Image (cartoon, grey):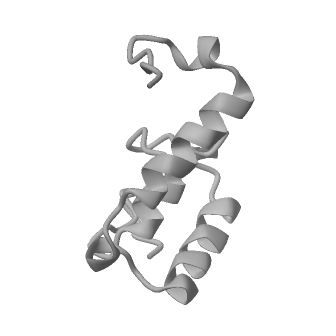
Amino acid sequence: MSIKCRKCLLSEIGEEALLRSLEELKNAIPDAERCDEYIYSKRLEICKKCAMLNEGMCTVCGCYVEFRALKSDSYCPDIIKRW
């Protein structure tokens, strides 16, 4: 059994490990809380065109857009709601 370090800064984790960790977190969101794949992909398309997106994060609220877009009860945090 390996113990995961929970005190690392994102810059210290390494890109591959970070991506794997984020994917695990996305997969841990229960199906009952997820929107369907079509809505998810549409939300991400909108986010990718937004000037407030920076390296996968929303600069309005600081979230990873892939998490916010996946949850069915989430919404765009900007003043002008895009989705």
Q: Position of residue 71 (x, y in %)?
A: 36, 68
Q: Position of residue 9 (x, y in %)?
A: 51, 13
Lateral position of residue 17 relative to residue 6, left or right: right
Residue 16 sits in which quadrant?
A: top right
Nearest to the observer: residue 18 or residue 53:
18
* Residue found at x 54% / y 38%: 21
Nearest to the observer: residue 61 or residue 32:
32
- Note whether 74 is above or below 13 in the view shown: below
Q: Position of residue 41 (x, y in %)?
A: 61, 77
Q: Quadrant of the N terminus?
A: top left
Residue 57 sits in which quadrant?
A: top right
Lateral position of residue 60 relative to residue 17, left or right: left
- Note whether 55 is above or below 43 in the view shown: above
Lateral position of residue 31 relative to residue 10, left or right: left
- Note whether 30 is above or below 42 in the view shown: above
* Residue found at x 53% / y 57%: 66
Q: Quadrant of the C terminus?
A: bottom left
Counting every numbered tag in the picture gives 0
